[in-house]
Each structure stands twice: as C-alpha cells, then as structure tokens.
Image: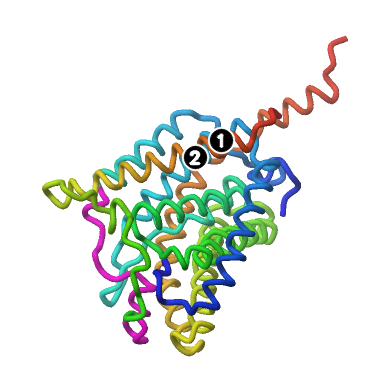
Amino acid sequence: MHIPDGYLSMEVCAATTAAGAAAAVCALRRTRSELARPRVPAAALTGAFIFAAQMLNFPIAGGTSGHFLGSALAAILFGPWAAAAIMTAVLIIQAVLFHDGGITALGANILCTAVIGSFVGHGSYRAALRLMKGRLRAAASFAAAWVSIVAAACGVALLLALSGAAPLPAVLGAMVGWHALIGIGEGLITTAAVLCLTERGVSRAIREDALRGGAPA
Amino acid sequence: MSGGRESGGERGEYRLTGNRRKWIVLAVLTLAAAGLLSPWASDLPDGLERVAGDLGFIDRETAVHSFSPMPDYEVPGIRGEAARTGLAGLIGSGVLGAVLWCALRALAKKER
C-alpha cells in the first residue's frame, strides 16, 4: 500500500508532506523519552524484519496480492510513537533506495501507514485486551493488526478521493475490501510475532517487590 | 496511551522477551525473508495497484525522480533475477537495521 508519485493532487501532496514531516519530528521526540536504550537493538531488528516481510507479497484472491505492513506489530512491541518512527524509517528507505512509494507521496504514506497504522494498532490492541480482561492476547493481536491495516487503507482512500483520483465511496469500498483480506495475513504474522517476542514480566514484578519491602536488615 | 516508559508492556504484565535466542531467530528469519524468499514473492498487483487499475487512476502514476539505486527491489548489473532481488533485500534490511540502530541509539541516549 505505497502511494506512488502522481496519484495525489498537488494540494494533497503539499498538505500531507507538511503534516507527515511534523508527525515524523514528533515521533522522534516522543521516541527519545519512551524508548529505553536497552530496547534499541530489538527495535532496529524489528524494523529490518518489517522491511524484509514487506517484500513478500502473497496472493490473496482474484489476481491480487498483498503484503505485511507491520505498523501494529511495532506499536504493540514498542509503543505507538516508536512504531511511527520505525515505520517512517522503513518508508524513507523504500522510497529513496528502491523507488517504492513516491517522494511527493512520502508524507501521505507516513501519515497513513506510520501514524494511522501505529496508533490504531496500538489503541485497538489495548482496547481488545481491556475488553477481554487481558486474556486471549492472540485474538487481541490479530484484531489490532487487522483493524490497523484496514484503517491505513481508509486513510489512503480518503487522500485519493481528496485528490480527485476516484469518488470516495468507490475507492473506500475497494480499498477496505482488498485490505480486509490482506489483513488476515497481517493478523497471522503479527500474532505469531507478538506471542513469540513478548513474555510475562514476572522478574520485574519480583524486583519491584524486593525494592519495596526487601531492604536488607 | 500508556504512561511513559513501559509503553510496550501491558500494565507491566507483558514485555519484550529477554530471550536472546528468540531475537536471533527473528534475525535469521529477516535474512531468510530478504535474501531467499523475496525473489519468489507474488508479482500480482497489490491492493492499492488493483484498486487503481479497477477505478482507472493507475495512469496517474509518474516518476518524479529516477535516482533510486535499486528500483523495484533489484540490484542492477547482476545476472539472475533471484540474485538481483535477494541481494536488494539483504542490502535493504541491513541498511534499515543499521540506520535505526544508530538513530535510535542517539535518541535514547539517557540511561534508565
């Protein structure tokens, strides 16, 4: 779901470039305070994984393919701001080195996949966990990933409609339809990765208890 | 949004695994996906391209720049499509990992 150059009108390009740049700066600032240093290698590796996984288009139906997005995965593992920063880096490298996604559409791609994808993914993951009282993390991850990629597709559809590429109902319906299918793959990959890469933080709870009450006599 | 520093864990219950082996597996998967699997990815149009074709705005695409060293995820000047794509994938993942590592390390400077 990388918007190439030319799909968007000049006005939409200008507005989304400004907004995308502001969002990227904001994401970097918030990452500074929210990403603890010991997590940096994991975050960098996750970014590399997302790039690699995005190359693997899988056929879905009717002569169409889809690929992993990764915003929800990054947001569940590292929080929405760090995820937005990671996804922005992925998009910049893809646009500059590989000509995937336009330069004039970079801001739009940042807004849709890095910002909307990460925040919707993070928000729906937490909402789903709260709804299910912390059980069924697999279902929460799957749902978050699915909602995240469909929300990003809605963002792209809205920008295309604003640009006069196609009427909103048609482009919104088509984008949501295809990405609802692609979202199944997104959900499976995200769920597997989240279940593998997170664990119950028992040791930290024990450490906190020890700090609170276990001062040496 | 979660409060501050523990934004990755759910109320302190879940957090990133400290199991090095799992991260090594992720690194191996990354290299395998980028280097070995990427040449066999589907060439069919993706969701957005399909919609652009169906709704008739795919012709709007223009090339604003042509300075990408590896357009369409292929390293030019190498024989064999699989090698071109696989190498582009490895380069891309490597560059991305390195850029993120340096940038995030510089950002997350303060020890916690």
Tell me which residue sits at (84%, 25%) in the image.
Answer: A212
Q: Which of the two residues, B8 or B101, is positioned nearer the viewer here?
A: B101
Instruction: Kindly give the residue lying farthest to the top in the view shown.
Output: A217
- Residue B66 position in % (x across, y down): 31, 61
Tell me which residue sits at (80%, 23%) in the image.
Answer: A211
Q: CA distance from mark 1 to mark 2?
A: 6 Å
Q: Which of the two residues, A206 or A95, is positioned nearer the viewer here?
A: A95
Q: What amino acid is labelled 2 in the image?
A: Ala
Q: Which of the two residues, A115 or A186, is positioned nearer the viewer here?
A: A115
Which disc number belongs to residue A143?
none
Say above or below: A77 vs A156.
above
Q: Which range of residues does the magenta coloring cover?
A: B37-57
Q: Which residue is mark 2?
A: A44
Q: What secondary structure is marked by label 2?
A: helix
Instruction: Name the quarter where the N terminus of chain A is drawn.
Output: bottom left
Q: Which of the two residues, A45 or A144, is positioned nearer the viewer here?
A: A45
Co-location on one chain, circles 1 and 2: yes
Quadrant in the rendering for residue A65 = bottom left
Give the colouring mode of the picture: rainbow
Q: Mark 1 — on which chain does it sit?
A: A
In the shown orientation, is residue B39 left or right of residue A93? left
Quadrant in the rendering for residue A207 = top right
Would you say residue B39 sits in the magenta stretch? yes
Q: Which residue is mark 1?
A: A40
Say above or below: A44 vs A170.
above
